[in-house]
Image: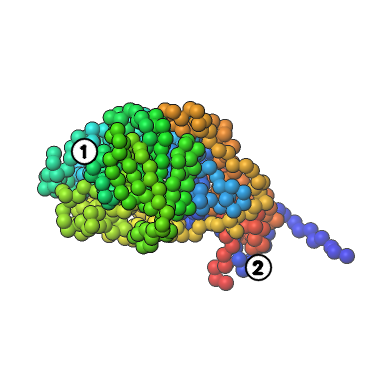
Amino acid sequence: MILRVHTEGRSRQKITGDQRTMVPIYDFADKSSPCRESCPAGHDISWALHLVQEGRFDEAHRLFREESPFPSITGRVCYHPCETWCNRKDYDEPIAINALERAVSDYGAVDVRPSPVAHPTQPVAVVGSGPAGVTVAYHLAQLGYPVTVFERERMLGGALRYGIPRYRLPAEVLDEEFGRLAALGIAFRTGCSVGKDIAWAELESQFRAIFLGVGLTQGRKLPVPGIEEVPARSGLEFLHAVNTGEVRELAGEVAVIGGGDVAIDVVRSSLRLGARAVHLYCLETRETMPAHPEEIKEALREGLYFNPAWAPQKISKAANGRIMLEFRGVDRLEEGLRPILNEKTTDIVVDHLFYAIGQQAEVEWVPQPICERGMVKANAAGQTALPHVFSGGDIAGSYNVVQAIGSGKRAAIAIDCFLQGRDASPYLTQASIGTKGAVSMRAYRELVAAQKGNGALLDIVRIDRINLDYFPEATRRERPELGLRERASFREVNGAFAREEAMAEAKRCFNCSECTVCGNCFVYCPDSAVVQREDGYFTIDGDHCKGCGQCVHECPRSAMTMVLEKGR
């Protein structure tokens, strides 16, 4: 027979936690999610999606903008590596993070005000208004520096405006974002080419630091006999002409040579301009070509004639001003994309020829000590052999928008450290998110302000630490898109979630590593040792916690951990 012992007084007066060897702690501030680690921009995705779940779009928008200047752009053109690493993909389907980022920018208000200039005697020059340069300007302006951006084109945006077709990124989205940047206090000088309109020596005399964010603006010439005899254009030149309105229609048949994203953009733009047929030839197979699979799929849906594993051998004039192309089959590619040919042959006659086989920069004006093989050589922080010169984006080897943003963030931190006489390395290390190169600007600000920073977020919560009992399977929502019959123009193909759809999709998120104040720890504690604080979060009452670990076991998101009791 078991006897129940009755005691006088309240249970809170009885100290019962002196037998434990392990104790639970709330350590979510020291953890992060796989989606954030794999986002080069370092967006706090997991917490942002918790805010979206609750309809707090304004706060989610501000959270995204802590780390990058334009979620409305990356919400459209980023190839979402975050979704590739989303824990939910190993359960049912990854969260539609890219579509939700756009929804945050669509429904979340943002109040942009001029940043106070804390360092008026330390102006910074940014050359190029593409994603890397704009990211540097954005964060340095918020850190109190006067920043001037030099852009050789008439309008701002670099590759965002002149290289990405409008069906992927509407011009009005760019205009709105650059309006916000100007309101922040960043100065822009358009139509100003460094080395022509302003000398390098003049930049060095006027600015304490210089960031080079110029793109790879020239297409590599197609090394095929006869290319000089026909009216062929590089893909970059063609896209520039389309985006500026120079080319408004395209009659007849088109051949595009290349297997990357530029080639696919040329294909899809040609179809919208009225081409009767568009034929793509590339050295690679569909599985090995570098273009993103989603873009290839859409191009095929829109009518592309796809010809993989063919190498151009000869180009010549045909009757009526047309162009003849002769090809040999490709068995395999060796190092350096050197094709090993077979005996298969084919040819085609077309009206227009575009090629997109690589890009290069115009670096004649860049000081020689920092150039190497047509690129600017910089370290992981973006600093070159000239200590006051930094670089990022395409010219330094970051080849898409979100990677350029990441390189711009690291360079902004390095420039701030350089101007303030600090070594950037420990700050970049302490601001790291995981091990893939992303950094947190919020963490850097806390470190500089000598606030209690959490340090590097190296503890990444994988799916084996998620309590899946709390997450029912749910179908991923796909954002709407234009039907094929509606794609005869440059209207934006990808649509937007409705507000309620965005909230519903965000609710699929595990919110890995976050404490969402679900209260499970409080409910399941058998000893009432979990106490809610005034700010809504919880703490552990050490006098009554026996270290059973029930709270940690029932935490859905790994916001808690059992650790050895101090002194044990």
Residue in front for this viewpoint, 44 or 518: 44
Image quarter (top left, top right, bottom left or bottom right) of the C terminus = bottom right
Residue drawn at x 23%, y 44% is 228
- Name the spot of residue 269 as percent of width and height, x first: 38, 35
Residue drawn at x 20%, y 35% is 191
Question: Extreme right residue here?
Answer: 1
Residue in front for this viewpoint, 232 or 272: 232
Q: Quadrant of residue 168?
A: top left
Instruction: Decide if residue 301 is on the left or right side of residue 391.
Output: right
- Tell me the residue that label 2 is attached to: 19
Spatial distance from mark 2 to mark 1, Cα to Cα?
Answer: 71 Å
**Circle 2 SS class:** loop
- Tell me the residue that label 1 is attached to: 152
Q: Is residue 84 visible?
A: yes
Vertical relation: 478 (above or below) 488: below
Camera-nearest label, 2 or 1: 1
- Name the spot of residue 133 as percent of width and height, x first: 28, 44
Residue in front for this viewpoint, 287 or 414: 287
Vertical relation: 481 (above or below) 388: above
Circle 2: residue type: Gln
- Name the spot of residue 431 as percent of width and height, x first: 38, 55
Which of disc 1 and disc 2 is earlier in sequence? Answer: 2
Residue drawn at x 36%, y 30% is 251
Q: Is residue 41 visible?
A: no
Image quarter (top left, top right, bottom left or bottom right) of the N terminus = bottom right
Circle 1: residue type: Arg
